[in-house]
Image (spheres, rainbow, N blue to C red):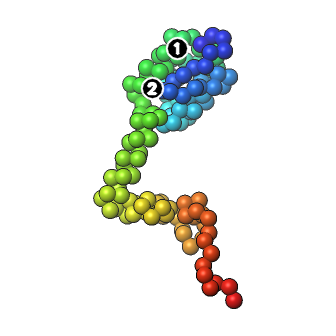
């Protein structure tokens, strides 16, 4: 994409000044490893910047991602459906999601404030 045009892949504006593998990680569902695999599959050098890519190369990246990766809205929908399925089944993880508690075995007597929200005062606690 010559000039100052913004590359748009999977509905996300990719930052133009960054290297291609780093810029691809701005798409939900694509991490460093996947981004580098995409670059090698499309035969784009990992040291090149997004603003140095031609329209054909951006199109090749876009088509490769559409064909091989679950990203953005589809991925979010799939994750939410998995959580809903666990909650409907009544599995342990589903119950933890339903009660808004940590799901992966973390302690809850202290910490876990991100998941539980701000601490609520207990009536009659003061001496």
**What x and y, as percent, mark residue 18?**
66, 25
- Horizontal and vertical percent for residue 41? 47, 21
Residue shown at 38% from the left, 42% from the top = 78
Residue occupying the point 38% across, 25% down: 67
Q: Are marks 2 and 1 in contact (CB under 8 Å)?
A: no
For the residue pair 72 and 52, the one nearer the viewer reads as 72
State the residue lying farthest toward the bottom.
127
Q: Could you tell me residue 63's position as x and y percent?
A: 43, 20
The tag on residue 57 is 1
Q: Quadrant of the N terminus?
A: top right
Disc 2 residue crowd, few under 14, some 14–19, many 20+, Cα 10 Å: some
Question: Viewer-proximal residue, 11 or 48?
Answer: 11
Label 1 SS = helix
**Residue at 52% over, 64% down:** 106
Q: Earlier in the sequence, mark 2 or mark 1?
A: 1
In the picture provided, is 91 more to the left or to the right than 65? left
| Distance between the alpha carbons at the discs numbered 2 and 1 | 12 Å
Give the labeled residue for mark 2.
Answer: 65
Quadrant of image for the C terminus? bottom right
5 relative position to 85: left or right: right
């Amino acid at each position: 994409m010559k000039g100052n045009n913004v590359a748009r892949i999977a509905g996300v504006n990719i930052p133009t000044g960054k290297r291609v593998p780093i810029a691809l990680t701005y798409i939900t569902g694509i991490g460093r490893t996947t981004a580098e695999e995409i670059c090698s599959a499309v035969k784009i050098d990992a040291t090149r910047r997004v603003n140095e890519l031609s329209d054909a190369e951006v199109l090749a990246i876009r088509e490769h991602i559409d064909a091989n990766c679950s990203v953005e809205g589809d991925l979010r929908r799939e994750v939410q459906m998995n959580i809903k399925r666990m909650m409907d089944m009544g599995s342990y993880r589903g119950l933890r999601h339903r009660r808004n508690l940590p799901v992966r075995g973390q302690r809850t007597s202290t910490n876990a404030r991100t998941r539980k929200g701000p601490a609520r005062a207990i009536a009659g606690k003061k001496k």
